[in-house]
Structures are given as C-alpha cells and as structure tokens.
C-alpha cells in the first residue's frame, strides 16, 4: 500500500504543476453536464415509462451513466499510457527493479488518475444536485462496491492492452472496442431493454450493463444492497474470470519482454 500511495502522490505532484489544465478539466465537467440537463428535460416525457426500475428522472439516469463512463474511460486508458510513457522515459524498468510487488506498482500508476476521476464525479454530482437531480445517498457505499466490481473486468482489458505495449510497443484496439461496446450496449444513455432483442442478449455479457442497473437501483430507487444481489453475483463472476485472464496475459508479456531484453526500448 505504501508503494501504491507513493507512486500516486508522485503523479499528483507532477500534475499540480499544471494547475490551469486541472481547472479546465473540472470546468469541462460542468460544460458537459449542462447540455445533458437540457436534453434530458426535453426527452423526459418520452422516456419516463421506460425508466421504471432505474429511476424516474432521465437527468439523474444520465448523471449516473456519465459518472460510470468517466471511470470506465480512465480504467481502460491509464495503465497502457502509463507503461508506455514509463518505457520511453526509462522509469518502467527502474520500477520493476525495485522489490515492490507488481500489483502495487500497477495500482500506483493508476492511483492518481482514479482519484482525479473521482473528484470530477464529485463535481458532476454536485452540479447535478444544484440543477435539481435527486439521489438516494444511503445507497452510496453499496454503489462504490458495485463500481469496484464493475471496473475489475475493465482493468483486465487494460492489462491486456498494456501487455501489447510491453510486447509490441503498440496498443491493441481491444480497449477502444470494449469501450465502444460498453457505451452502446451498457445502458449509459438509455435503458438496455430498449435495445433490439438480439442485441439485448449481447448486452447481458457487458459488465457495465449490470453495474449501471445495480447503481441506478441503489442511487435512484433507494434499493437496499440485498435487492441487487443478482447483479453483484454476475459482476463478481466477471471480475474473477477477467482478472485471472488479464493477469496471465500481462505476466506472459512481461516475461517475453524480459527475455527479449526490450523493457527499456521503445
């Protein structure tokens, strides 16, 4: 844990030297939510009946989806980018030479990005509340658990993408493909039951689908954690299988790069 916090702190200190960029990033969240507010208001009468079971107000529905999408995008892009940058600068090989556990290094490289995303989501929800969105805050802690289980499979995808950077010095299109699939089939902007039947069956295999369904039941419907047990069980299954697969692929790529002697070459 100390290694993870140290790496995250180092990245944070580097980011704080670009304060204007950080401020613009937060203002960008505000600029994003305003169009969502007006669009949601226009579509509310059309979608009100379709939203039952995931909140009655389309604006709050979209806020939860947008926040999840922010975390999803960060999860898929941070590790491959950090490892690629570390190879270029020579810090990646130096980190591997330390006695720190590999998982702690990877978590540390992602720590700042996840913290910053959490801060942007805080701003997102704060502005949404000011604009009239209502949330059941008693469901916040269970939603954090849901979010964690939802993101684990995407961490595995990020590991596979990072494995491509290690082995071939290029990112595979896997992460971008998974992101697009999750956006269109995961229910970010509309309930998944509005998707045509055969596509809805595909959506059942997208972790974000179950994560958003559970999160909206908790935050918008006031459901208890016992009411989302089926979604939690599916997310746990996805997380275990994906984590094992992603870890094996990444470990294999790391061994290959070491044998080839290319850890410090881009």
Image (cartoon, helix red, strand yellow):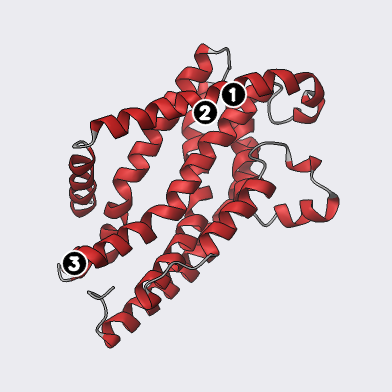
Query: Front-most of 81 and 1?
Result: 81
What residue is disc 3 on? 90
Q: How far apart in space, not on screen, are marks 3 and 2 (Cα)? A: 37 Å
Residue at coordinates 45% horizontally, 57% vertically from top-left?
A: 155
Q: How far apart in space, not on screen, are marks 1 and 2 (Cα)? A: 6 Å
Residue at coordinates 35% horizontally, 29% vertically from top-left?
A: 24
User: Could you classify mark 3 by the number of other residues whose Cα lies within 10 Å: few (under 14), some (14-19), or many (20 or more)?
Assistant: some
What residue is disc 1 on? 35
Q: Where is residue 15 in the image (x, y as percent from the top left)?
A: 23, 40
Q: Are marks 1 and 2 in contact (CB under 8 Å)?
A: yes
Relative side of 130 to 56, left or right: left
Classify 196 as above or below 191.
below
Q: Are marks 3 and 1 in contact (CB under 8 Å)?
A: no
Relative side of 83 to 227, left or right: left
What residue is disc 2 on? 32
Lower sequence index among marks 3 and 2: 2
Relative side of 18 to 41, left or right: left
Lower sequence index among marks 3 and 1: 1
């Amino acid at each position: 844990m100390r290694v993870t916090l140290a790496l995250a702190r180092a990245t944070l200190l580097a980011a704080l030297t670009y304060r204007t960029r950080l401020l613009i990033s937060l203002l960008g969240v505000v600029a994003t939510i305003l169009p969502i507010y007006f669009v949601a208001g226009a579509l509310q009468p059309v979608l009100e009946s379709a939203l039952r079971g995931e909140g009655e107000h389309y604006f709050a529905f979209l806020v939860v989806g947008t926040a999840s999408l922010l975390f999803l995008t960060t999860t898929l892009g941070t590790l491959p980018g950090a490892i690629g940058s570390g190879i270029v600068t020579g810090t990646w090989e130096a980190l591997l030479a330390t006695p720190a556990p590999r998982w702690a290094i990877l978590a540390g490289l992602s720590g700042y990005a996840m913290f910053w995303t959490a801060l942007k989501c805080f701003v997102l929800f704060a502005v949404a509340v000011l604009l009239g969105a209502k949330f059941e805050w008693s469901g916040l802690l269970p939603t954090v658990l849901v979010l964690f289980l939802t993101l684990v499979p995407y961490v595995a995808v990020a590991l596979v993408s990072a494995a491509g950077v290690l082995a071939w010095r290029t990112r595979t299109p896997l992460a971008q493909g998974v992101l697009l699939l999750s956006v269109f089939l995961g229910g970010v902007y509309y309930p998944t039951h509005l998707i045509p039947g055969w596509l809805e069956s595909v959506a059942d295999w997208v972790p974000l689908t179950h994560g958003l369904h559970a999160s909206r039941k908790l935050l918008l419907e006031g459901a208890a954690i016992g009411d989302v047990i089926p979604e939690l069980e599916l997310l746990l299954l996805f997380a275990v299988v994906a984590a094992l697969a992603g870890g094996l692929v990444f470990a294999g790529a790391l061994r290959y790069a070491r044998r080839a002697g290319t850890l410090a070459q881009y």
